[in-house]
Amino acid sequence: MTAETAPRSSRLSTREGRERAIFDAARAVFAEYGFKGATTAEIAKRAGIPKANLHYYFPTKEALYRAVTEDVLTAWLEAASSFDETADPAGAIATYIGAKMDMARADPIGSRIWASEILRGAPVIGDFLETTLVDWLNSREAIVRRWISEGKLVPMEPRYFFYLIWATTQHYADFEGQMVALNRGQPLSEAQFETAKAQVIETLLRGVLRG
Amino acid sequence: MTAETAPRSSRLSTREGRERAIFDAARAVFAEYGFKGATTAEIAKRAGIPKANLHYYFPTKEALYRAVTEDVLTAWLEAASSFDETADPAGAIATYIGAKMDMARADPIGSRIWASEILRGAPVIGDFLETTLVDWLNSREAIVRRWISEGKLVPMEPRYFFYLIWATTQHYADFEGQMVALNRGQPLSEAQFETAKAQVIETLLRGVLRG
DNA sequence: GTCTATAATCGGATAGAC
DNA sequence: GTCTATCCGATTATAGAC
């Protein structure tokens, strides 16, 4: 899942196509308005099906929202796996930031769904945060602490470094509207985005590498 | 405006008190659910007044939302003024990051209202972004470029550095829910927050200062 | 000036048609 | 198996009471 493709017309001819059309429309609407602000009417309209029909494919608005959020978690876990302790610190950090930035660029809607969910107190992904995310952070903190004790990184609290990375990658997806306003009304070009990504990596590496 | 105080009981006895109660309740509800997801019923309930009565003080939901967002812009401008070109780069940057972090800590709700507004395409603050914010960024970019040319900062695209700062400060307000989950269910203590703030400042300064 | 009963519309969901 | 007419509660806003 996650990406949006397929010709608009033929899309609704199969069951899978209709489900997919609803799913994609729901992603966009939930990202823009959050769970409560989103309406099944708007989702159905964007999917190109009659409103009431949506309930045949997804029984409730909440079921649809759960399907969408679970998909976002899957993508999150994929990017998370790119932080590799076998690499040297600079390589691991650069790769991880790059993967997160690319993900924010490729799927800003997924990022916004995540943000919107956290903003309202994470009622749906709360479990994930308290289990999988806690475990992930604990194991990565241990790696970073080892690198610090080996003198490869400056002394620091590892989690606040991860917050710095998460904040930034999230920002490039969630605040696209603000960036567009600050970029003469244009979204960041591919070249601008690559420049931004390189600069984020360089700045943060200089910020934490020892020597 | 911006802060929430006053004893709950006596608060509703004056007109100003009632308006203030509505205003504060609206801030909280808009921050949590966004404009569309917020309901005047929920706002009235939290304000402690009958639902329909709210419309006497603020004629429409949108008027109330505008009042709330304008207040957020005022606070934003205050923090923005703390970036001072008369200081040396390290001092100016440290002061600015500190002011933004403190603001996110003191008024996370304001930050979330801003985030929520950007997420849906900034229909209300769009003008502000295209005028005041563009001007602010342009003038600050000029200052940073001068510092770069004087050899005080590493070569970089100044705006992406500001994005890094905005992203981080925003994150500490908007993703409080995630941080709580990652902190044994506890909000960051004052000490933890001060540690985080110092680390953000140190990391970013090392990342951009020359030498 | 302040508040509330009520109108008008919207939104999620279902029972039952095709 | 697929779709829609329709129900009913929620929501914004107002007209008019106090």
Image: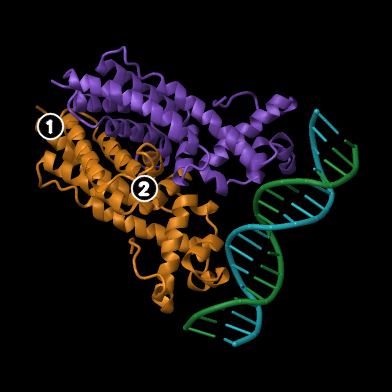
Chain colours: A orange, B purple, C cyan, D green
Q: Is residue A197 left or right of residue B41?
A: left
Q: Secondary structure at mark 2?
A: helix
Within 10 angstroms of label 2, few (less than 14), some, or many (20 or more) residues? some
Which label number is shown at residue A130?
2
Measuring from the top left, give residue B206's x and y in whole percent: 19, 25
Image quadrant where one finds the C terminus of chain A = top left
Identified at 58% across, 46% down, the residue is B38
Q: Quadrant of residue A53?
A: bottom right
Upstream in sequence: badge 1 or badge 2: 2
Gap in Å between the C-alphas at discs 1 and 2?
Answer: 28 Å
Confirm whether circles 1 and 2 share one chain.
yes
Within 10 angstroms of label 1, few (less than 14), some, or many (20 or more) residues? few
Identified at 73% across, 40% down, the residue is B50
B142 or A43: which is nearer to us?
A: B142
Chain bearing mark 1: A
Q: Which residue is mark 1?
A: A149
Chain bearing mark 2: A
Identified by mark 1, the residue type is Ser
Identified at 41% across, 43% down, the residue is A177
Identified by mark 2, the residue type is Glu
A82 or A171: which is nearer to us?
A: A171
Q: Quadrant of residue A168?
A: top left
Residue A202 against residue A122 in the figure, above or below? above
Which label number is shown at residue A126?
none
Q: Is residue B194 visible?
A: no
